[in-house]
Image (cartoon, rainbow, N blue to C red):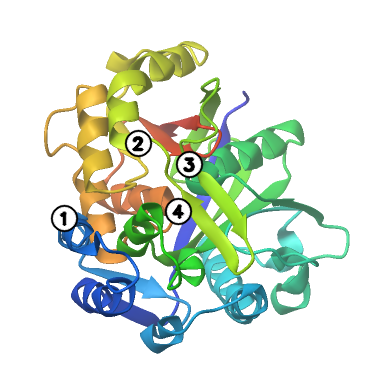
Amino acid sequence: MRPVGLLSLATAVPPYELAQDRVGESARAILGPQYPQFARMAPVFENAGIRTRRSAAPLSWYLQPKGWKERADAYLAAAPSLFEAAAKAALEAAGLGGPDIDQIVTVSSTGVVTPTLEARCMGRLDFRPDAVRVPVFGLGCAGGVSGLALAARLAAAEPGSRVLFVCLELCTLSFRMRAPSKADIVATALFGDGAAACVLRTGDDGFAQVTGAAEHTWPDSLDVMGWRVDDDGLGVIFAQSIPAFVRRRLRPAMEAMLARQGLAVEDVDRFLCHPGGAKVISALETALTLGQGALDHEREVLTRYGNMSAPTVLFVLDRARKAGLPRRSVLTALGPGFTASSAALAAA
């Protein structure tokens, strides 16, 4: 792939902060009577490696059952403003405005709106009427890397064009307070809300260049992660242990993805990983032979924001950028499919 410069990167979070201890207390009060094994599950709130998370709604909003319409209304109320905040910050950091953007890639899997978010923000951000819109749904936690790779490919296909990539998830709006499953309780302990945005253009401008990208989807793995569509909204699917899956199967897939980009694991100075949870981070360190504690940016992002699904890995990249990117890094994330996605970065 022709190198594509990352001209800017910005992050944004919604206004409500959820303290993990308060979320755990509320979950015990509401879910405990409905889930007889809750006491055995309760330590997940303490062991998740999370101190605070951000939410599109205050904690009180989650204390009563919600249906599809209420969840959709909450997504529509919060998502456009968060999209605008992330996109505007990325544009300003790149020294550009909305009229300078030729293509807009939007990734979100936690809400469904039509017209989609970038269309709803056309006037807010002064995008040109002829700007190409590419909304993407269903990538889940892999969306930050897969979406960035898609935006880079679009930029490479039209040299000189400027592509805005916005990745936004409001995971908390799917929290389940009625007839919870084990997976629902784990999700309640893990997920938060956030957004990130980048501006890309072919060439060697920016703080890094995307030099390649690859994906690997494992056969017969649809039950590892995904959404379950129920009458009252979307319910999370975790049918297999993701940390165990990572330890067993990520390394060969990563070697194959890197080989397609002319790289080996040993060529990578720093893997920048989506921190799905504390146990997933440890499994990544084991699978990639990184050493315990190597993924420090990932742990810090998880502690402060929880797992925001797709944008989380871009929060990790932002921390690494501010600390100083090494010569060669690889951005990677896992998501429904079950799919590993990677993008190779060369520091400017």
Q: Are marks 2 and 4 in contact (CB under 8 Å)?
A: no
Q: Which residue is mark 2?
A: 242
Which of 57 and 324 lies nearest the eye of the viewer? Answer: 57
Q: Is residue 252 left or right of residue 79?
A: left
In this view of the protein, can residue 227 be seen by the observer? yes
**Quadrant of the image occupied by residue 75:** bottom right
Residue 117 drawn at (x, y percent): 70, 67
Image quadrant occupied by the C terminus: top left
Callout 4: 10 Å neighbours few (<14), some, many (20+)?
A: many
Going by the numbered disc 1, the residue's amino acid type is Asn
Q: Which residue is mark 1?
A: 47
Q: Are marks 4 and 1 in contact (CB under 8 Å)?
A: no
Which of 324 and 226 lies nearest the eye of the viewer? Answer: 226
In this view of the protein, can residue 310 be seen by the observer? no
CA gap between label 3 and label 1 equals: 21 Å
Q: Are marks 3 and 2 in contact (CB under 8 Å)?
A: yes
Going by the numbered disc 2, the residue's amino acid type is Ile
Which of 202 and 117 lies nearest the eye of the viewer? Answer: 117
Q: Which residue is mark 3?
A: 225
| Element type at mark 3 | loop
Q: Which residue is mark 4?
A: 309
Q: Is residue 66 left or right of residue 253?
A: right
CA gap between label 4 and label 1 equals: 19 Å
Say above or below: 104 vs 72.
Answer: above
Q: Residue at x 33, y 38 (%)?
A: 272
First-in-chain label (3 vs 4):
3
